Image (spheres, rainbow, N blue to C red):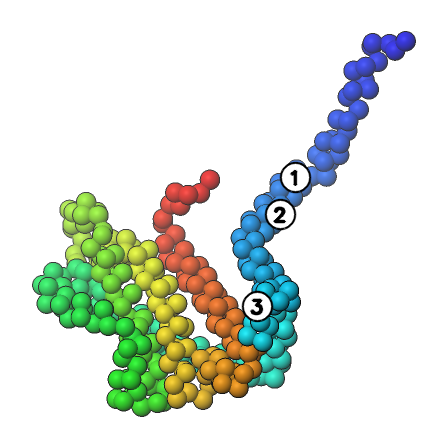
Amino acid sequence: MVDIAERPTRLAAPAAVPDAVAAAGPGAGGLAGRLLGVGGKALHRSVAILALAAIWEGAPRLGLVDRVFLPPLSEVLVAWWELLRSGQLAEHVGASLTRSLAGLGLAVLTAIPLGLLIGWYRPLAELLSPLLEVFRNTAALALLPVFVLILGLGETSKIALVLYACSWPILLNTIAGVKGVDPLLIRSARSMGLNHLRLFQKVILPASVPTIFTGVRLAGAYSILVLVAAEMVGAKAGLGYLINYAQYNFAIADMYSGIITISAIGLVVNQLLVALERRFSTWRVDVSAG
């Protein structure tokens, strides 16, 4: 017959496990929880990409699609590595990034100041609005023959085309950002005696930063997409040239390697712009946090 007085002692034995965790240090449990949380988020965000990779690898091997036109992902990655090892990929990426960043940088330097002026000064907005409506509805690629005829097949026409394509999202978002500033903030700043320059510096520009960066991120995507199309015409280097050349020579794996590289560059550029936006808008409160 079991003594009832012994039961609490036997049941209390497992309590030694939490004591061991506590002895390991007060931050051990928190660190493990944070690592699990980061790993869970990374896995959650990667599920769709992993599923796409699995479908891409499996569908050609199972005969669901013709592997001549869609080779398995592993073969594409092998071709990508060969292009990287031979130096061809670095050459094409360097040429494309030089043109893309040059056009995007010029668009930022010209479109943001112009957008601030148009958004703030109503007479200037009324004067330029009809002209802006005409050009904003004209696709950049539709003007590619015009740029080639006027500026030739060299680097100037490609950078100018990227500049044109990137200017519109930056310009229009900058105008919208200035016009969307809370009038109460403007009246409060004026009541404190701020002149026009200080008003722009302390109120208008900070309040417009999120909207401006939305336009810059859109322009970053446009700078890659438009450039790839432009490089398919009269270029001797660049990712667009690589894709076009591989298609004509039926090097399908190389063609997909170029496409994957473009997607990766677009992702990296977007993440860099997101980090830059956070750096310039540290005053914002993240309402989705927690």
> Label 1, on which residue?
29
Numbered disc in front, either 2 or 3: 3
Residue 28 percent location from the top left of the image: 67, 41
How many C-alpha atoms fall within 10 Å of the one at disc 3: few (<14), some, or many (≥20)? Answer: some
- Local secondary structure at mark 2: helix
Residue 223 percent location from the top left of the image: 37, 72
Amino acid residing under circle 1: Gly
Question: What residue is shown at x 72% (from left), y 39% (from top)?
Answer: 24
CA gap between label 2 and label 3 equals: 40 Å
- Residue 261 appears in view: no
- Local secondary structure at mark 3: loop
38, above or below 53, in the image: above
- Residue 96 in the figure: left or right of residue 173: right
- Residue 212 in the figure: left or right of residue 41: left
> Label 2, on which residue?
35
> Label 3, on which residue?
65
- Local secondary structure at mark 1: helix
**Which image quarter: residue 57?**
bottom right
Residue 14 percent location from the top left of the image: 77, 27
Question: What residue is shown at x 35% (from left), y 89% (from top)?
Answer: 153
CA gap between label 2 and label 1 equals: 10 Å
Amino acid residing under circle 3: Val
Q: Nearer the viewer, residue 226 or 194?
A: 226
CA gap between label 3 and label 1 equals: 49 Å
Numbered disc in front, either 3 or 1: 3
Amino acid residing under circle 2: Leu
If the image is split into quadrants, where does the N terminus sit? top right
Residue 232 percent location from the top left of the image: 41, 83
Label whose residue precedes the other's in the sequence (2 or 3)? 2
Question: What residue is shown at x 34% (from left), y 60% (from top)?
Answer: 213
Question: What residue is shown at x 41% (from left), y 55% (from top)?
Answer: 278
